[in-house]
């Protein structure tokens, strides 16, 4: 099943509220968050042999990479919003 079928309701909702590009990025953030939750749950059971209080090194790396990807997507969304505000004409030029 494709992401467009699996997350159809979320895509429709976010695309309506934010536009196509930002809406799809918002759903991407949701998907990354879901992946982070699963990695976190896995990290509880898959602990490091050196430090049992921490997840295994591969789980830590996956967690970091997913968080990095979320940050990049969030930054793109912010840039899109900022550029959209710059291109909008003010309603009241005297204000």
Image (cartoon, rainbow, N blue to C red):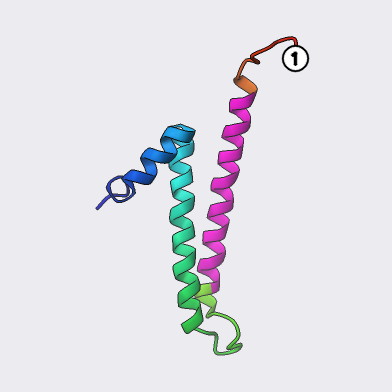
Q: Residues within 10 Å of mark 1 (few under 14, many from 20)?
A: few
Does 59 appear above or below 66?
A: below
Q: Could you tell me what secondary structure mostly forms the magenta stretch?
A: helix
Furthest-left residue in view? Answer: 1
Dividing the picture into quadrants, the one containing residue 83 is top right
Disc 1 target residue: 95
Q: Which residues are magenta?
A: 60-85
Where's residue 79, x and y in %?
A: 61, 36
Residue drawn at x 64%, y 14% is 91
Does 91 appear above or below 66?
A: above
Total label count?
1
Where's residue 9, x and y in %?
A: 34, 44
The residue nearer to you, when weighing 24 against 10, is: 10
69 inside magenta stretch: yes
Where's residue 82, x and y in %?
A: 63, 31
Furthest-top residue in view? Answer: 94
Dividing the picture into quadrants, the one containing residue 54 is bottom right
Q: Quadrant of the C terminus?
A: top right
Lateral position of residue 64 relative to residue 34, left or right: right
Lateral position of residue 77 relative to residue 7, left or right: right
Where's residue 58, x and y in %?
A: 50, 74
Does 39 appear above or below 11?
A: below
Residue drawn at x 40%, y 40% is 13
50 inside magenta stretch: no
Dot 1: element? loop
Residue drawn at x 54%, y 77% is 57
Lateral position of residue 15 relative to residue 81, left or right: left
């Amino acid at each position: 099943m494709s992401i467009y079928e699996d997350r159809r309701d979320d895509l429709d909702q976010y695309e309506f509220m934010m536009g196509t590009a930002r809406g799809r990025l918002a759903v991407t953030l949701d998907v990354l968050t879901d992946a982070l939750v699963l990695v976190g749950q896995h990290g509880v059971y898959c602990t490091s042999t050196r430090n049992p209080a921490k997840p295994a090194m591969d789980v830590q790396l996956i967690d970091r990479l997913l968080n990095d990807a979320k940050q990049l997507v969030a930054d793109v969304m912010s840039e899109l919003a900022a550029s959209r505000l710059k291109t909008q004409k003010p309603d009241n030029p005297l204000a």
